[in-house]
C-alpha cells in the first residue's frame, strides 16, 4: 500500500464541495430539497454565503436529481457537477475530482441540506487540518441532546480519532459515546482523492461512504482529528417539511434576538418575520405581525406599525409605515415620510415629509416632498399592456377619492379636488376639479318613494 501524501504549509487555498445529489423524497416536492427557502433564500444559498467568508478558489455543487434547478440557482456563484447514479457520499465527492484537477489546497466537504454551518466552524476545521500533527482528515463532531442513530466519533481528549463507527456497527460502549459525526469533513486535495480511491462498497447499501476515508487513513498510520461544534443546530440536516419549518423558526428566533441586540424594539418579537437580508437601523420600532420580505432596508428611528408587509423597499430615517400597509418592490420612502393604514406603494418614491395616510394605491410614481395624498387616491398606472408614471410635485395636495390617470404630471403646490379623475397635466399652483355637474331636483326623492310604496302595496 503506497504512502499517503503528507501536509503542506498552512494558509493554503481552499476548495469547497457541497453535496446535493439526493432526491429529497421526504419533501414531496417538485422543487429540489436544497432550494426550499428559509427566510426567503434557498437553503443552498445560505450555505454558499457562509462559504464565501473563506474566499474559496473553487465551489463545486454535486447534483443529481433536479440538476437543472440547481444550475439555475447557483449559476452566478458555483460550478455544478453530476453524480449519476448516486452511489453514496464518497462516490459523490469523487465526481468533483475533475473540476479540482491540479488543485493542491485544502478541500472542505459540506452538505446542501445542512445550510447553517458557521464560517468560524469551517475555519476551525481548516486550522486543525493545518496543525503541526498534519491530520489526513478532520471531521466535525457534535453532541446532540438525543444522539439517536448517529455515527460515533471515538476520539481522545485532544481530538485525535481512534475510530469512526456507524451506530448499527457500534458496541454498547461505543454507543455510550455522545460525540457524533456530522458528516462534514476537511482534507488536503491529494489526501482526499487518494483515500477515496481506497473506499469500498462492501456494505448493505452497496455504496461508497465518505467517513470511511478516516478509518482508512488511521489504518495507514496517518492521524485524523475531530473538531467539535458547541452549536448542534448548525449541523442539523433538513429533510422534511417539518424540519424545514423548525429551521425557519430557529432562524427567525436567532434573527429577532440579533435585531434587539442591535438596538431595534420589537413589541411582540415572536410575531415579526425577517428575510435573510433585512437591514434595520438603530431605534427602529416594529409593532406586532410585521413581515419583511427580501430586499428591505429600514433607517434609524423609523416605526413599522402592526400588520404591515414590506418587500424590496427602502424606508428612510424617521418614517412611519402602517398599520396594515404594504410596501412592494421599488418603494423608497424618504426621511420623515408617512404611509398609513391600508396604503399600498409600488415602484414609487415618497419625498421627504410626504404623506399617504389612508386607503390609497401609489404605483410607478414620484411624490414630491411634503405632498399630501388624500384617502382613497389611486394612480392608474396600467392600461392592460404598459405601465405609466405619475409625477406629483412638492407640497401638492391630492384630494380624497381621486384617480390620477398616468402618464401624468401634477405640479408643485397644485391642488386636485376630491373626487377628481385627472387625465391631463396639472400646472404648478393650479386647482384641478374634474367632476360631473351636480343635478338638484327638489322633492324628487319624496315623490319616488311615494310612487314605489304605492306600487308595492298594489302587488301585495
Image (cartoon, rainbow, N blue to C red):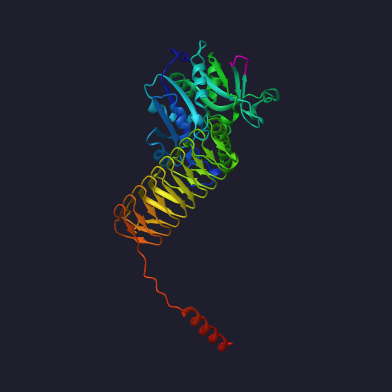
Q: Is residue 198 visible?
A: no
Measured as percent of width and height from the top left, residue 368 is found at 36, 46
x, y percentage for residue 294?
Answer: 46, 41
Of residues 441 and 204, the one drawn nearer to the viewer in this rendering: 441
User: Residue 387 colored magenta?
Assistant: no
Q: Nearer the viewer, residue 324 or 70?
A: 324
Going by the picture, which residue comes out furthest to the bottom? 458
Q: Which residues are magenta?
A: 155-160
Q: Quadrant of residue 424?
A: bottom left
In the rendered view, would you say 403 is above or below 78? Answer: below
- Residue at 43% of width from left, 58% of height from top? 400
Of 5 and 416, the residue lying toward us: 416
- Relative to residue 435, is residue 246 drawn left or right? right
Quadrant of the snapshot with the C terminus? bottom right
**Nearer the observer, 426 or 228:** 426
**Is 281 on the left or on the right of 180, as rendered?**
left
**Is the magenta region chiefly helix, strand or loop?**
loop
Amino acid at each position: 500500500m503506497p504512502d499517503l501524501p503528507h501536509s503542506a504549509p498552512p494558509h493554503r487555498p481552499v476548495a469547497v464541495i457541497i453535496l446535493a445529489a439526493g432526491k429529497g423524497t421526504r419533501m414531496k416536492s417538485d422543487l429540489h430539497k436544497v432550494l426550499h427557502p428559509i427566510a426567503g433564500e434557498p437553503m443552498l444559498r445560505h450555505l454558499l454565503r457562509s462559504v464565501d467568508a473563506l474566499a474559496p478558489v473553487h465551489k463545486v455543487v454535486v447534483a443529481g436529481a433536479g440538476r437543472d434547478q440547481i444550475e439555475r440557482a447557483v449559476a452566478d456563484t458555483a460550478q455544478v457537477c453530476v453524480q449519476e447514479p448516486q452511489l453514496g457520499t464518497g462516490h459523490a465527492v469523487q465526481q468533483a475530482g475533475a473540476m479540482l484537477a491540479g488543485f493542491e489546497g485544502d478541500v472542505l466537504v459540506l452538505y446542501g441540506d445542512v445550510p447553517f454551518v458557521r464560517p468560524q466552524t469551517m475555519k476551525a476545521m481548516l486550522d486543525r487540518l493545518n496543525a503541526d500533527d498534519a491530520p489526513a482528515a478532520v471531521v466535525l463532531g457534535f453532541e446532540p441532546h438525543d444522539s439517536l442513530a448517529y455515527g460515533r466519533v471515538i476520539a481522545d481528549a485532544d481530538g485525535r480519532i481512534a475510530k469512526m463507527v456507524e451506530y448499527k456497527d457500534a458496541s454498547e460502549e461505543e454507543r455510550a459515546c455522545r460525540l457524533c459525526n456530522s458528516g462534514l469533513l476537511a482534507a488536503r486535495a491529494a489526501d482526499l482523492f487518494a483515500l477515496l480511491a481506497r473506499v469500498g462498497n462492501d456494505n448493505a447499501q452497496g455504496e461508497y461512504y465518505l467517513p470511511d476515508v478516516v478509518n482508512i487513513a488511521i489504518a495507514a498510520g496517518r492521524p485524523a482529528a475531530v473538531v467539535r461544534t458547541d452549536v448542534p443546530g448548525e449541523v442539523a440536516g433538513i429533510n422534511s417539511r417539518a424540519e424545514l419549518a423548525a429551521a425557519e423558526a430557529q432562524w427567525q428566533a436567532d434573527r429577532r434576538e440579533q435585531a434587539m441586540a442591535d438596538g431595534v424594539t420589537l413589541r411582540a418579537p415572536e410575531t415579526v418575520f425577517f428575510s435573510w437580508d433585512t437591514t434595520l437601523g438603530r431605534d427602529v420600532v416594529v409593532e406586532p405581525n410585521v413581515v419583511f420580505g427580501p430586499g428591505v432596508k429600514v433607517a434609524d428611528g423609523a416605526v413599522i406599525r402592526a400588520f404591515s408587509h414590506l418587500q424590496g423597499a427602502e424606508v428612510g430615517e424617521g418614517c412611519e409605515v402602517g398599520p396594515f400597509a404594504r410596501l412592494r418592490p421599488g418603494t423608497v420612502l424618504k426621511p420623515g415620510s408617512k404611509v398609513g393604514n391600508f396604503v399600498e406603494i409600488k415602484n414609487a418614491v415618497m419625498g421627504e415629509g410626504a404623506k399617504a395616510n389612508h386607503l390609497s394605491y401609489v404605483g410607478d410614481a414620484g411624490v414630491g416632498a411634503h405632498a399630501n395624498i388624500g384617502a382613497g387616491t389611486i394612480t392608474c398606472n396600467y392600461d392592460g399592456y404598459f405601465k405609466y408614471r405619475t409625477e406629483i410635485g412638492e407640497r401638492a395636495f391630492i384630494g380624497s377619492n381621486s384617480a390620477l390617470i398616468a402618464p401624468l404630471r401634477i405640479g408643485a403646490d397644485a391642488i386636485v379636488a376630491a373626487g377628481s379623475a385627472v387625465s391631463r397635466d396639472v400646472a404648478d399652483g393650479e386647482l384641478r376639479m374634474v367632476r360631473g355637474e351636480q343635478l338638484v331636483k327638489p322633492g324628487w326623492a319624496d315623490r319616488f318613494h311615494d310612487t314605489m310604496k304605492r306600487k308595492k302595496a298594489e302587488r301585495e
